[in-house]
Amino acid sequence: MKTALGAILITEEEIRSRIAEMGRQISRDYADHTVTLIGILKGSFVFLADLIRAISMDVPVEVDFMSVSSYGDATTTSGTIHIEKDLGIPVNGKDVIIVEDIVDTGLTLLHVYNILSGRGAGSLRVATLLEKPGNSKYEGAIDYVGFRIPSKFVVGFGLDYAQRYRNLPDIRVLDEI
Ligand code: IMP
Ligand code: MG
């Protein structure tokens, strides 16, 4: 498939101000708690880096990452998920927020959610920068959503197509040409 970088869907400035709001909301919700953010690699690393700095320094924050594969280089989701890199810290009894770049079918999220709840996380919430409609597999609540976007393939701000475009400061549509 031939692709080309398309229009800007969400600007750098819009992302910045939305993440600041999300950080304020998390700071309110977790006042007096330690919160453990689990970033799903690789896509979430840019969002997570900004999000932790938007959380009040009065809230103790722990961070770890997990890498699961679902997409490969294609733009459709396969039904299988494989843990490529596991967490380095235990989550049992902890107040965890799963941090995703984008929830599309919800399959990745469903698997990660089940893994972390199976390990005895004390509480489990979800933050995603982007959500596409038709998130059919994961039926739980997504507690913090940055932006709801149309069903288009997007790149930038950590999101890739075949490992490219993660460095774009904004979110763009990837067009088929
Ligand atoms: P899901 O399992 O279908 O919800 O897909 C989740 C994962 O697929 C995300 O963490 C992304 O890595 C990838 N993904 C889904 N949609 C897009 C997109 O539009 N652009 C880039 N990656 C995407
Ligand atoms: Mg991802």
Image (tube, helix red, strand yellow):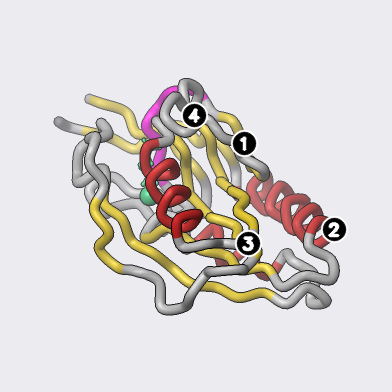
Disc 3 secondary structure class: loop
- Between disc 1 and disc 4, whose residue precedes? 4
Q: Position of residue 86 (x, y in %)?
A: 34, 69
Residues at marks 1 and 2, CA–CA distance in whole angstroms: 18 Å
Ligand 1 sits in quadrant = top left
Q: Relative to 87, does residue 110 appear above or below in the rendering? A: above
Compared across the picture, whether 109 is left or right of 34 comes to left
- The kind of residue tagged 1 is Ala
- Between disc 1 and disc 2, whose residue precedes? 2
Q: Relative to 106, does residue 63 appear above or below in the rendering? A: below
- Between disc 4 and disc 2, whose residue precedes? 2
Quickly name the residue at label 3. 122
Quickly name the residue at label 4. 132
Residues at marks 1 and 4, CA–CA distance in whole angstroms: 14 Å
- The kind of residue tagged 2 is Arg
Residues at marks 4 and 3, CA–CA distance in whole angstroms: 28 Å
Compared across the picture, whether 112 is left or right of 11 comes to left
Comparing marks 3 and 2, which lies closer to the viewer?
3
| Quarter that holds the C terminus | top left
- The kind of residue tagged 3 is Gly
Mark 3 and mark 2 residues within 8 Å of each other at the beta carbon = no
Q: Does the residue labelled 1 lie within 8 Å of ligand 1?
A: no
Compared across the picture, whether 35 is left or right of 133 comes to right
Which range is magenta? Answer: 150-155
- The kind of residue tagged 4 is Lys
